[in-house]
Amino acid sequence: MELRVAKIAETHDLMLSVSDWLVATVARCAPRHPKVLASWQDDGLFYHSHPHVGFALNQANGDLVVPVIRDADELELLDLVGRIRGLQKKAVRHRLEPKDLMGGTITVTSLVGTGVQQVFPILVPGQAAIVAIAEPCELGPVRAYALTLGFDHRILNGAEAAAFLSSVADGMTGGELHDE
């Protein structure tokens, strides 16, 4: 996967991390699996029309913030990464506004770079799914990342969740989801 990310970064002349690529891939895959964008409400499911992707950021003081990129599926990769960087800068400077943190329909979290090889993410209230990626581990000659999915069983069953996670994994490693 690192080679794919490096190739895409070179093609687009941008700094692209595995975490950025996960945000982009989730944004492209989610509309094909509408239940991952749904919310459980007293009168039934509410389906959101676009993925507003939140991405978890750990702050130096121990706080966790989740800025949101609205309509992430409609952004070109360069624009998406630009929005991620802009929100990261605002977070570091403690300048995130409430509008930067509201309206997420799905969340991504990454522990790449921490040494942790498995993540069990906890859902953001009101969302059906959260996708996590961990540090790669060596499986013989192959480096493999663990992708995990936390999901609301009231909205998705296990097969539906697995189909979405499989789409994300395929998009991360070689699927035709992105303009390269």
Image (spheres, rainbow, N blue to C red):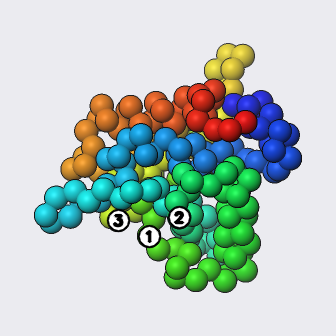
The reply, left or right, for residue 57 in relation to residue 180 is: left
Query: Residue 121: image x %, image y %?
Result: 45, 51
In this rendering, the answer to whether 71 lies above or below 15 is below
Tell me the residue at 77%/30% (across/down). 3
Query: Residue 148: image x %, image y %?
Result: 47, 40
Q: Quadrant of residue 136?
A: top right
The reply, left or right, for residue 126 in relation to residue 84 is: left
Q: To which residue does mark 1 refer?
A: 103
Tell me the residue at 56%/75% (across/down). 100
What separation in Å lies between label 2 and label 1 (alpha carbons)? 8 Å
Q: SS at mark 3?
A: loop
In which quadrant is the C terminus drawn? top right
Tell me the residue at 39%/57% (across/down). 49
Tell me the residue at 68%/38% (across/down). 179
Mark 3 / mark 2, whichever is N-terminal: 2
Q: To which residue does mark 3 refer?
A: 125
What separation in Å lies between label 1 and label 3 (alpha carbons)? 11 Å
How many neighbours does mark 1 have within 10 angstroms: few (below 14), some (14-19), or many (20 or more)? some
Q: Quick check: can you spot residue 21?
A: yes
Q: SS at mark 1?
A: loop
Q: Quick check: can you spot residue 64?
A: no
What separation in Å lies between label 3 and label 2 (alpha carbons)? 17 Å
The amino acid at mark 1 is Gly
Query: Residue 88: image x %, image y %?
Result: 69, 68
The amino acid at mark 3 is Pro
Mark 2 / mark 1, whichever is N-terminal: 2
Q: SS at mark 2?
A: loop
Mark 1 / mark 3, whichever is N-terminal: 1
On residue 70, the disc is 2
Q: Nearer the viewer, mark 1 or mark 3?
A: 1
